[in-house]
Amino acid sequence: MDNEKQFENKVKSWLHQLQKEGQPIKFIKIWGGGFQKAGIPDILACVNGHFVAIELKGTNGKPSELQKYNIRRINECNGTGVILYPEQFETFKLLILDLLRR
């Protein structure tokens, strides 16, 4: 299993745990492919009524220009778009917990 897939599983597991605890969060994993529009972030979530888009990258991963553009546009539209690396996971968890308290 590669670095990004392991990280994806870690993020999804934590989000599932929040759901099990009854937190107001819903998320879906987007599966890329020939029938999918390119550049959609890996995970789309609604966290306590707030739109969150997460582009997952392994430690050495690089986002494409389209991925960076989409994350930037989501933020410009008052959503929360992040390009998330494993090293930033603890900070990301604080962000999500903050959204849950709003």
Image (tube, helix red, strand yellow):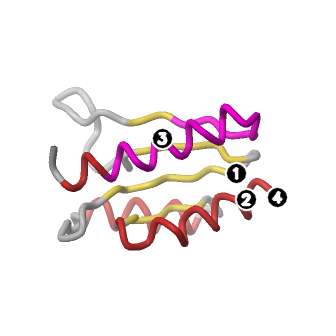
Q: Residues within 10 Å of mark 2 (few under 14, many from 20)?
A: some
Residue occupied by mark 1: 50
68 or 95: nearer the viewer: 95
Q: Are marks 1 and 2 in contact (CB under 8 Å)?
A: yes
- Whichever of callouts 1 and 2 sits on the residue coming sooner in the sequence is 1
- Whichever of callouts 2 and 3 sits on the residue coming sooner in the sequence is 3
Q: Is residue 20 left or right of residue 2?
A: right
Q: Is residue 70 left or right of residue 90?
A: left
Q: Where the N terminus falls, by quadrant?
A: top left
Camera-near label (1 vs 4) is 4
Between the C-alphas of marks 3 and 1, the distance is: 20 Å
Q: Are marks 4 and 2 in contact (CB under 8 Å)?
A: yes
User: Which label was assigned to residue 13?
Assistant: 3
Residue occupied by mark 2: 99
Between the C-alphas of marks 2 and 3, the distance is: 18 Å
Give the quadrant of residue 78. Answer: bottom right
68 vs 37: above or below: below
- Whichever of callouts 3 and 1 sits on the residue coming sooner in the sequence is 3
Between the C-alphas of marks 1 and 2, the distance is: 7 Å
Between the C-alphas of marks 1 and 4, the distance is: 11 Å
Q: Is residue 15 on the magenta stretch?
A: yes
- Whichever of callouts 3 and 4 sits on the residue coming sooner in the sequence is 3
Residue in view at x 56 percent, y 36 percent: 16
- Secondary structure state at the residue bearing disc 4: helix
1 or 49: nearer the viewer: 1
95 vs 31: above or below: below
Q: Amino acid at mark 2?
A: Leu
Which residues are drawn in magenta?
A: 7-27
User: Which label was assigned to residue 101?
Assistant: 4
Between the C-alphas of marks 4 and 2, the distance is: 5 Å
